[in-house]
Image (spheres, rainbow, N blue to C red):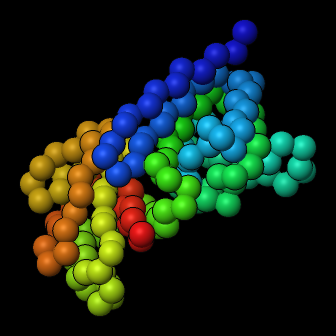
Amino acid sequence: MTTCRRFYRECPEFNICVNIGKKDYVLAEDPEERYTIFQYGINGIGKFGRIFESDFITFEGGKFYDVREYVHDNVVFHAQEDFFLIGFNTKDKSQGWEGRLLTESELDVTSNAPEILHNRRYFIICFDGKPIVNGKKLKRYDYSEIYPNKKYNIEHTGVLGLFTKLS
């Protein structure tokens, strides 16, 4: 029997979901329960897509995936190897979010665009390792809001996601 352990962390602006499972595990979600809009694979390989469609994404460990287009669909994930996935979930499907892996060694939120100061909030999440941000060591699942007009120095001894709440 293949198994999967699932964890869920409630955060004020978003949620984090975690799936850790064995090869051949199949996970199905319907649109009512699906709020995952970005995923990061710690390890493993699996196929992800809409139920009964031949197009699919091959999830691989060490990669970040934008899965916003699937939030209103019936989806399925089939593990090709043992896996560990971390999902970024919106609390409201009508909210706009952007997400990406953070690779810069210095982040200055004000340098991107003038609209940053209006109606946007920024969060970092540690997906893996122990990155250091402004001298503070983070561990997996740690998150923090980051603010305009402040610089963040980052030592990349892990993987950080940067998420922007647009609305």
126 over 21 or under it: above or below? below
Q: In which quarter of the image is the N terminus?
A: top right
Q: Which of 48 and 62 is in front in this view?
A: 48
Foreground of the two, 164 or 65: 164
Q: Is residue 166 visible?
A: yes
Left or right side of 150 for 5: right
**How many numbered marks, from 0 up?**
0
Is residue 138 found left or right of 71 in the rendered image? left
Relative to 29, does residue 94 appear above or below in the rendering?
Answer: below
Image coords of residue 115 (percent x, y): 33, 86
- The residue at the far bottom in this view is 114
Q: Which residue shows up at 56% across the image and 47% down it? A: 36
Q: In which quarter of the image is residue 123?
A: bottom left
The x and y percentages for residue 162 are: 37, 62
Of residue 93 and residue 53, the one placed in the foreground of this image is 93
Asked whether, in this view, residue 4 is left or right of residue 120, the answer is right
In the picture, residue 151 is in which quadrant? bottom left
- Residue 80 visible somewhere in the drawing: no
The quarter in which the C terminus is drawn is bottom left
| Quarter of the image where one finds residue 164 | bottom left
Q: Is residue 143 above or below residue 19?
A: below
Residue at image point 41% right, 71% down: 166
Please state which of residues 34 and 87 is positioned toward the viewer in this rendering.
34
What residue is at 49 percent from the left and 33 percent from the top? 18
Q: Position of residue 13 (x, y in %)?
A: 35, 51
The residue at the point 70 percent across, 30 percent down is 27
Left or right placement of residue 74 versus residue 115 in this view: right
Residue found at the very far left of the displayed protein: 135
